[in-house]
């Protein structure tokens, strides 16, 4: 796998310059209170019509890594990653053999080898393309032109479905999903109306934006922009298409702006709470030196990502359940730090997932519609419990904190 071709690295650097140096237009999720009133309702969940493995397995939650050498699949598997997204100049026979040996799923292009392996269960989805909504490269000497028109994406999608309709087709879009100020779309800047059209050309919609690595002061560190993009894709797909998103976990092209493990965990749970149904880790680094698998060379971050993935995998049956709407009201004591929540129920207990949406500390008070009397909640993976009285409890959130609560079945049977 030629992951270090000079021409490829050059094109990535050009794209990353556009990716990381951009102004932010607008803000997201302001205010201190996230209040949901009214009767409890179950949110619509995008249908998963694919009956082949692993889609039919409620224990499967897609955790992918972007464009990596299949020779490293065993190490990524140990880190809790279960899917490869993209293959350089692939798929090839050797790549598919290596991934199958490692027990790794793959999302790959529909080239001649891919079409020949339509019956290979290692391939779980087809890769449509990467960032067609950006201005497309015309080569190193000529810069970037216009984005690929949505109608072309739809046409290619229909051709791919004609080859194989049993698998979903994933389309990865750019940071233009998350905010309108991104200038990398050329003549289509400030045209968010394009995105509902792009979504007609895929079964799973994904996007990437890396706020910690961003150079622009209006973007840098604003982790909630990831959640902004997830919410917009969900809305543009009318809640009927699964949404995935990419997660930064290296310095990429900015050694001074490497995310911390806590920031990565916050981005992950902001994504999940706002509707993401799959994650793709971007693990490349281009400065101070090129390292296409930089996550594997960073013991601290690798341990953190492994722990995040372990927790998601354990909670996969919960995450794959519908979200229960109107189930919780949360009041943040610090007006500058709203707290986002998601409630689900599986096999008896209900689960409340919460994340602080700003770089600050706060105390949050939760009131659950389905909790009666006094009870004790388990805080997952924190070796502690919290007492709840008459359906309410409070907890402290450090900057970018995530807390995951498990409620006993007896306390939630009335409403949840």
Image (cartoon, rainbow, N blue to C red):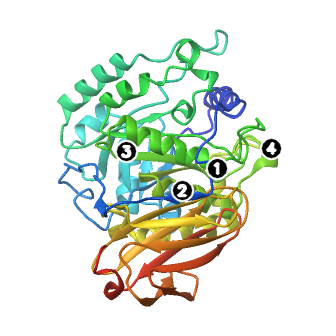
Q: Which mark is residue 270?
A: 2
Q: Earlier in the sequence, mark 1 or mark 2?
A: 1
Q: Label 3 belongs to which residue?
A: 107
Give the CA distance from mark 3 to mark 2. Answer: 24 Å
Q: Earlier in the sequence, mark 4 or mark 2?
A: 2
Q: Earlier in the sequence, mark 1 or mark 4?
A: 1
Closer to us: mark 4 or mark 2? 2
> x, y percentage for residue 104?
39, 58
Determine whether, in the image, residue 334 is placed left or right of residue 178: right
Give the CA distance from mark 1 to mark 2. Answer: 8 Å
Q: Label 1 belongs to which residue?
A: 223
> x, y percentage for residue 195?
42, 27
Closer to us: mark 3 or mark 1? 1
Q: Which mark is residue 288?
A: 4
User: Does residue 91 appear in this view?
Assistant: no
As rendered, which of 38 and 412 lies closer to the eye?
Answer: 38
Q: Earlier in the sequence, mark 3 or mark 1?
A: 3
Give the CA distance from mark 4 to mark 2. Answer: 29 Å
Do the numbered discs 3 and 4 sit on residues whose CB atoms are within 8 Å?
Answer: no
* Crowding near the residue tagged with mark 2, few <14, some 14–19, many ≥20 C-alpha atoms within 10 Å: many
* 152 is higher (above) or lower (below) than 371: above
Q: Secondary structure at mark 2?
A: helix
Q: Quadrant of residue 140?
A: top right
As rendered, which of 162 and 229 lies closer to the eye?
Answer: 229
């Amino acid at each position: 796998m030629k992951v270090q071709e000079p021409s490829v690295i050059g094109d990535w650097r050009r794209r990353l310059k556009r990716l990381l140096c951009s102004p932010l237009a607008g803000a997201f999720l302001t205010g201190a209170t996230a209040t949901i009133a009214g009767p409890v309702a179950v949110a619509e969940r995008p249908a998963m019509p694919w009956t082949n493995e692993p889609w039919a397995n409620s224990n499967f939650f897609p955790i992918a890594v972007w464009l990596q050498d299949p020779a490293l699949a065993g190490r990524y598997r140990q880190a809790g990653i279960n899917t490869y997204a993209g293959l350089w100049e692939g798929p090839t026979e050797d790549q598919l053999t290596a991934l199958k040996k490692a027990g790794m799923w793959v999302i790959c292009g529909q080239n001649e080898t891919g079409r020949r392996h339509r019956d290979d269960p290692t391939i779980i989805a087809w890769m449509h393309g990467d960032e067609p909504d950006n201005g497309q490269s015309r080569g190193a000497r000529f810069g970037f032109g216009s984005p690929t028109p949505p109608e072309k994406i739809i046409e290619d999608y229909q051709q791919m479905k004609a080859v194989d309709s049993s698998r979903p087709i994933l389309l990865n879009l750019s940071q233009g999903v998350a905010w309108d100020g991104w200038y990398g779309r050329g003549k289509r800047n400030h045209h968010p109306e394009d995105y509902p059209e792009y979504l007609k050309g895929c079964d799973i919609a994904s996007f990437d934006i890396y706020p910690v690595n961003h150079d622009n002061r209006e973007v840098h560190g604003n982790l909630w922009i990831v959640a902004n993009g997830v919410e917009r894709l969900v809305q543009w797909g009318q809640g009927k298409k699964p949404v995935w998103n990419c997660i930064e976990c290296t310095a990429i092209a900015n050694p001074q702006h490497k995310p911390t493990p806590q920031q990565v965990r916050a981005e992950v749970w902001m994504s999940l709470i706002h509707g993401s149904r799959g994650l793709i880790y971007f693990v490349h680094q281009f400065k101070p030196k090129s390292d296409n698998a930089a996550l594997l060379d960073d013991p601290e971050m690798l341990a953190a990502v492994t722990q995040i993935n372990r927790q998601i995998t354990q909670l996969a049956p919960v995450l794959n359940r519908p979200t229960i709407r109107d189930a919780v009201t949360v009041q943040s004591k610090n007006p500058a730090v709203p707290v986002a929540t998601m409630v689900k129920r599986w096999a008896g207990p209900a689960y409340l997932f919460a994340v602080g949406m700003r770089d600050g500390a706060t105390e949050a008070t939760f009131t659950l519609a389905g909790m009666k009397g006094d009870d004790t909640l388990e805080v997952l993976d924190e070796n502690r419990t919290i007492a709840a009285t008459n359906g309410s409890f409070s907890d402290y959130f450090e900057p970018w904190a995530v807390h995951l609560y498990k409620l006993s079945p007896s306390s939630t049977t009335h409403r949840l």
